[in-house]
Image (tube, rainbow, N blue to C red):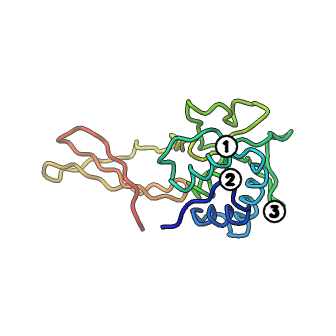
Amino acid sequence: MTQAPTSNDACLSIVHSLMCHRQGGESESFAKRAIESLVKKLKEKRDELDSLITAITTNGAHSTKCVTIQRTLDGRLQVAGRKGFPHVIYARIWRWPDLHKNELKHCKFCHYAFDLKQDSVCVNPYHYERVVSPGIDLSGLNIQHAGKVYQKEIILRQANAVFFVVYYSSCHNLFVKQRAD
């Protein structure tokens, strides 16, 4: 296992290491440009760059500080000719490639979250949680007797995901699991 870089390492080395942790979703060239831009902005804020490196290389296993960039007038960041909200761009790169901009909620410990409207914006993807919109309609659910387990498979397409909904009468809980296609 290779050692994670530190803020003292060259930008290219840091970018290469952080690229190894991307989740897909964005093209490799877009992700590389976005990560290069972020690393350059953080080069003068070594403690925040180290927090970013730790957060990404440990998949959020260690608590880390806010990683901030200056908020623009319209709140968006431009990378490779595309504009987007900075916290969403980096959350897509490192955590949820299919993320929609309205599916993020900041964690309570984040002091510079995007929606707090401060001069700086936290782009640490582990300072945000994904919230799924409550648009799943279960009104058409029919429970059929199948022994002790009542089960009805419903295919719901929301945000390109397929879910199974299973009702277990023995514990009276509703379980929702994502199906791997």
* Neighbourhood count class around disc 3 (C-alpha, 10 Å): few under 14, some 14–19, many 20 upward: few
First-in-chain label (2 vs 3): 2
Q: Is residue 108 left or right of residue 85?
A: left
What mark, if any, has residue 84 been given in the picture?
none
Between the C-alphas of marks 2 and 3, the distance is 24 Å
In percent of width and height, residue 142 lies at: 31, 48
In percent of width and height, residue 29 lies at: 73, 69
**Mark 1 or 3, closer to the camera:** 1
Which residue is identified by label 2?
7
In percent of width and height, residue 129 lies at: 54, 42
First-in-chain label (1 vs 2): 2
The residue located at (57%, 60%) in the rendering is: 4
First-in-chain label (1 vs 3): 1
Indicate the secondary structure of the residue bearing disc 3.
loop
Which residue is identified by label 3?
80
Which residue is identified by label 1?
47
Q: Amino acid at mark 2?
A: Ser
